[in-house]
Image (cartoon, grey):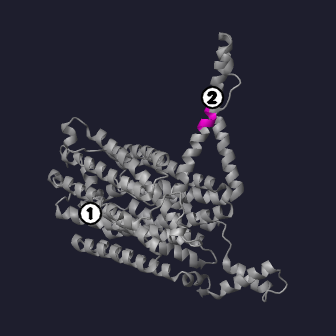
Amino acid sequence: MSKPSLSGSEAELEWKPSFYSAAFRSVSAEKQQPSNESQPLLQNNGARGSTDDTNCCKNLANLPCRQATKGVQWISMLQKNYGAKLLIALIIVQHLTKGFVMSWIGNALNYYFRDLGGINSSTIQTYTAVISTPWCLKGILGLISDTVTVFGYHKGPWITLSTIGFVCAGIYVGLSPVKTIKLQNAIACLLLMQLHIAWSDLLTEAKYSEKIRQKPAHGSDLISFVWGGLSIAQLLAVATVGQLIEHLGAKYVFALSVIPCALGIFPGSLNLLEEDPQHVRAQQQALIHPNGDGMGPGLEAQGNEQLAHAGSLWSCFGFITINTSKICKHSNYFVLVLILTGLSLVLAVVGAVSTNNSLNCTIAIGAGLVTFIAFFVLADPLVAKTNSFFLLYACCYISIEGATFYFFTDTPEQYPGGPNFSPTFYTTVIGLIASGTSLLGIYIYNAFLSHSKYRTIFLINGLMWTLINIISCAVFLRWNLLVGIPDEVFVLGSQALQQMILQFGWIPGVVLMSHLCHEGMEATMYALMAGSQNMGSNISYFTGAYILEVLKVQPSGAKNESHQFDNLWLVAVISSLGGLVPLLFLPYLIPDARPDEKLVHVR
């Protein structure tokens, strides 16, 4: 069962409608383009028709060439406006790392835990939450890159360092025998790999957002390039990962992922992000015009700004510089970042060392409550309310993925009479179907819901999600077989509906979050809100692990473990009904506005 998300990145929102509508416009233009040869077919003889048929075939044959030419021209336009270096950096980080590699290792993770042996469903969920911690730390990662420079660079060194960490971790996990590797070492390495993906993703998002602000005319094209390529990379990853797991084993997916991720060394070492070291510029200004003499009004103001900036710098070891001005200017959000970072790290440590699911769940719920309170105390009321809804949304959709993984993928020896899906079907076939039907969700939103109020959209989304998930529980009771529906057909149908619902609920969530970001600190606020919601997802993993333990749903891939799934249907029903809880707070937490309305007047 998929887990819903109302958030993503601001770029995702801007890409999907514009990318697909642009594609549809291109196809429509091809269809509607007048042809000088088509009309005579209706009035001339058969010979003329034969000639026109030939010309029509030639036109169809040349269509791929024309589209390829347009593609080359489009890339050339992007290169002219934003530079080849940035496009290469985005291909390496966004397409290969976030799109391809993350999809690879995400699909291989549960299989790797099963290969380690003896890891039950609750433990899988706990470890998944631990490994996902870097995505909760986006706030502090963004703050570090904004305030700390290495040799004057904000972004490149951090991408380089995290790439080295990913390569070392991937090689260790991918080449170490599963029977001898220490579980704690494997968890640490998998977390380090996620840290690289999350941090490099954040830094490149900040860079192309900066470029779009400088040249907004082609901003939608750049976003289409990023997210179009990312989606293609994800499809390629999904299409291949099943065969890799089935024939090589899950651990080799991690080893092979090192190859594309190693390219992450280039954005920093070759300065593909085209950073200009700030401390060098400040020194040059001070040396050339120490008192601002001889400068025009504009340059004098710039020099004063640089000197003021230099006054807020702290130097460490001669090559690391810390800028405290941003921290002082937005101290309330800086405190929020520290609170969220501390809570996320506490949950990670607890999940890594504690096997007491009851204790883990209690601490996780406590962390969620502290996050709620902190936002209401330190953030603007509208930001606090909206973020609380999304955090509650993430917490209440209780994850039970650890159990459903075993239910669907156990072999006939482990679960006689079960679905017994192969890795190829479970990862590749279902993944491709889910990716395709998500387009339908985007269409539904644009066609029917884009002008509806947020409250209406989230209400419809929540009710439909709960209904579909409760119906999907039939597979855990094997009722679908009683009415003659094979497991494969039933699961593909339910996944298609779930992905469609996810998409039309996810887009307005991203729109709403983007409206809440203060001017001048969009990246920090967006990272902070996204991080808190990712922590909510981790809380749902801990909560789900506890419920699975209480209801004795603890499959681990052992032989003849059919009895472990007796209460899985009940766990699934509880998880589905939990999604109704946030809907009770819609009138109090979500503004009474539409996605196409600005929320400035509500502040």
Closest to the observer: 146 or 182?
146
Q: Residues within 10 Å of mark 1 (few under 14, many from 20)?
A: many
Residue corresponding to mark 2: 61
- Left or right: 365 with respect to 49? left
The range drawn in magenta is 27-31
Tag shown at residue 251: none
Question: Is residue 223 in sight in this rendering?
Answer: yes
Q: Amino acid at mark 1?
A: Gly
Residue 116, position as x, y percentages in the image: 29, 60
Q: Confirm whether the magenta stretch covers residue 30.
A: yes
Closest to the observer: 424 or 370?
370
Question: Residue shown at 25%/37% (left/top)?
Answer: 485
Please tell me whether residue 334 is drawn above or below residue 388 in the rendered image. Answer: below
Closest to the observer: 426 or 582?
582
Q: Residues within 10 Å of mark 2 (few under 14, many from 20)?
A: few
Sequence-wise, the earlier of marks 1 and 2 is: 2
Residue corresponding to mark 1: 544
- Left or right: 317 with respect to 259? right
